[in-house]
Amino acid sequence: MYRSNPQRQETVAWKTLHSSEKADTLLIEAGNTNVKLYFKAKKLLVSKNQTDQHVSNVFYEKLEKSISSLLSQDIESVAWTAVNKEVHDSIHAILSGLPSHNICLQDHHGGLKTLLGAQHIHGIGTDRLLNALGSREFVRQTMSMVPTNTPIVSVDAGTATTIQLLNSVGELVGGYIAPGLQSQLNALHREAPALEHFNVSDFDTEELQTIPVEENTLRAPTTTKSAILAGVLTPLVSQIRTIVADIQQINLNVSVVISGGNGRPVYKALQQQYMNENIYMFFVPDINAFGIQCFVEHLSTQS
C-alpha cells in the first residue's frame, strides 16, 4: 500500500532526555571537524578548521573555554567520545583532574557491543555503536507510531557516511562505510580543479526535481551544480533504498534514521522518493548524543 504522506519526522533527539531535571550530565561528541557539547537545552559547537591536519592552539583554547564554561554549572558527570586521536587527547587533558565523574565511551567499547548484540562485528568504532544505540532507543522510546519489532537502518552522514543495520529485536547486524558527501566533493575538486568547489550546504535537493520532464523522455541533471549533487547523492540514496527493499523481503515495516552534519540533503532526497506507508523515516542530527545519554543511563542501572 502507498500513500502521498509517508511516516517521517524531523526532530532533535537529545532534547528528549535533556529537558529532564535529571539530566545532569555534560555530553561531548567529537567528530573529525566539530566538537559538540550538550547540557540540558544547551548545545555548543566548536569547529576545527577543515584545512588543519592537527589540533591547533586556537582550537584547543576554544575547546577548553567552552568545556570550562559548562563545567561551572551544576554538572555531576561528563560523558564523551572522540573519533580523532588528537581531539581525544585534548579533551582528556582538559577533563583530567576535574571533580566531575568522567566517562569516556571508548573505555566502554565492549559494553556497547554487548548491549547491541554486536560481539560478532570486528573493528567497529565507538561512534558507529553510539549511532546504532541512539537510533534504536530513539525509535523505541519516542516514536509510538512505529510498530514493535521494526528493523532500523541508521545512516550517519558525516566526514564518512556510515550505515548501521539493526534487526527486528534491536541487535546490530553490521553495516557499511563510504566517503561522506563533503569528502567526495572535496576530493572531486582536488582532482579536477576546473570544476567549481561546492559545500553540501550549497545544495538544494529540490534542484533535482525541477528538471523538465516530458513523457517517454530521459531525465537527467541539466546544470554542472545539479550534476555534481546527483553524482554524490544519488548513489547513497540508491544504496539506502536497496537496503530497505532487501529488509522488506523479510519485514514489511522499516525505520530509517538519518543523522549527521550532511544528513539533511539525504533526508530530503529520500522524502522526495519514498511514498511507502511502511517506511518510518526520521531526521535526527544529534542521534549520537542521544546514544551517549542512553548508555550513561544504562550504566547507572548497572551500578
Image (tube, rainbow, N blue to C red):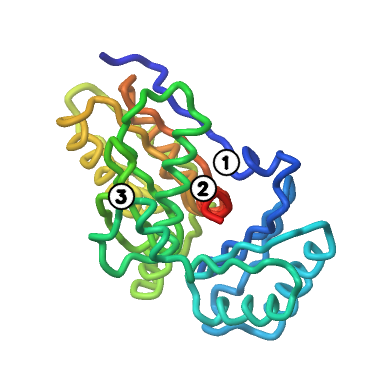
Q: Which residue carries the number 3 mark?
A: 172
Identify whether 34 is placed above or below 166. Answer: below
Q: Nearer the viewer, mark 3 or mark 1?
A: 3
Q: CA distance from mark 3 to mark 2?
A: 16 Å
Q: Which residue carries the number 2 mark?
A: 287
Left-right relation of 254 to 134: left
- Residue 28 screen position, x and y as percent: 62, 62
- Which quadrant does the C terminus fall into? bottom right
Secondary structure of residue under mark 2: helix
* Residue type indicated by callout 1: Ala
- Residue 63 screen position, x and y as percent: 70, 73
Identify whether 150 is placed above or below 156. Answer: above
Q: Residues within 10 Å of mark 1 (few under 14, many from 20)?
A: many
* Point 25% across, 46% down: residue: 239
Q: CA distance from mark 2 to mark 1?
A: 6 Å
Q: Which residue carries the number 1 mark?
A: 13
Check contact, mark 2 vs mark 1: CB within 8 A: yes
**Which circle's residue, 2 or 1, is located before the other in the chain?**
1
**Which circle's residue, 3 or 2, is located before the other in the chain?**
3
* Point 50% across, 80% down: residue: 85
Residue placed most toward the observer, 68 or 274:
68
Q: Residue furthest front?
A: 303
* Point 53% across, 31% down: residue: 142
Residue 243, picture quadrant? top left
Left-right relation of 75 to 177: right
Secondary structure of residue under mark 1: loop
* Residue type indicated by callout 3: Leu
- Residue 135 screen position, x and y as percent: 44, 43
* Residue type indicated by callout 2: Ile
